[in-house]
Amino acid sequence: MNYKMKYLFRHFFKQTAYFSTHNLTPLLIYTIGLVFLLVSMPLMDAGGVMEYLYTMVGLMASVWLFSMTVLNKNTAFYKDSVLKVNYIPLYMRILPTIIFQTFIFLMYVVLYSALTALVVDDWLIDIFTLLYYVLLGILLIIPFTLIYLSVKMDRIGTVNIFVFIILVISVPVLYLPENLVPWMQHLLSLNPFYYVINGLQANSVHISWNINRLPHDILFFAQIILLYLWMFEYYSKMKLSIYHHLKKRPGA
């Protein structure tokens, strides 16, 4: 096992030690939603449980994508952080948080689906479709994480709240896509986060990937290619910007 894999393995298991309150906040949100589902299951019919599952998967997916970026930002600017380890590439340093948060997200999506199956008497989720959209989510969030790391912000807490609100509004968490007018649906479908989160939501209620989504796939991958072309172009500048910013910090 080379040093990069050792680093990845070691820091995956250290996730609950670094900023434990922050790193475990997504888990707390998922757990609260799960407890509410357990308590309210006797009071809801199959349709109500499926609607709750759809909404919660959308909310959890938003928290999952958001947390991978914000928690990496917290770790990056923590004294004695992993960003000060020169022999580990920048892209490798963000992976422990991404893998840890993805593991928790997948575990809870399966738990929610298992509880729903007790009510609807059917296993709704398609595992391969779930893994497909999770992979797309990871591919999407990596460039945004690197961009977020390179941006200097004074009131980062306020900015984080604002960004999360924008994310939740722009994806189908507070509403159903079918309730929107057609032009609004088409506009929102241009948002790659909408595509990933709505795909996870649809899959949670037994609508797995099919050939009809191919045009949306093509649009998504075109956006991803443009993001990664930009990222590869500015990757070295990002590293240099972060390095100089860290050197200016007292005690860094």
Image: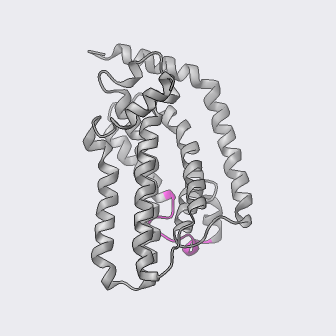
Q: Is residue 63 visible?
A: no
At horizontal 40% and vertical 86% (from top left) the residue drawn is 45
Position of residue 72 relative to residue 31, above or below, is above
Nearest the viewer among 208 and 198 is 208
Tell me the quarter of the picture where residue 31 sits.
bottom left
Q: Position of residue 32 (x, y in %)?
A: 29, 62
Left or right: residue 190 compared with residue 86 = right
Nearest the viewer among 154 and 209 is 209
Q: How is the image coloured?
A: one colour
At horizontal 40% and vertical 51% (from top left) the residue drawn is 104
40 in magenta: no
Q: Position of residue 249 (x, y in %)?
A: 32, 17
Tell me the quarter of the picture where residue 235 sits.
top right
Position of residue 46 relative to residue 126, above or below, is below
Left or right: residue 208 compared with residue 11 = right
The kind of secondary structure the magenta stretch mainly shows is loop
Left or right: residue 47 compared with residue 191 = left
Q: Position of residue 120 (x, y in %)?
A: 46, 82
Position of residue 65 relative to residue 1, above or below, is below
- Which residues make up the magenta segment? 170-181
At horizontal 39% and vertical 73% (from top left) the residue drawn is 115
Q: Position of residue 181 (x, y in %)?
A: 60, 72
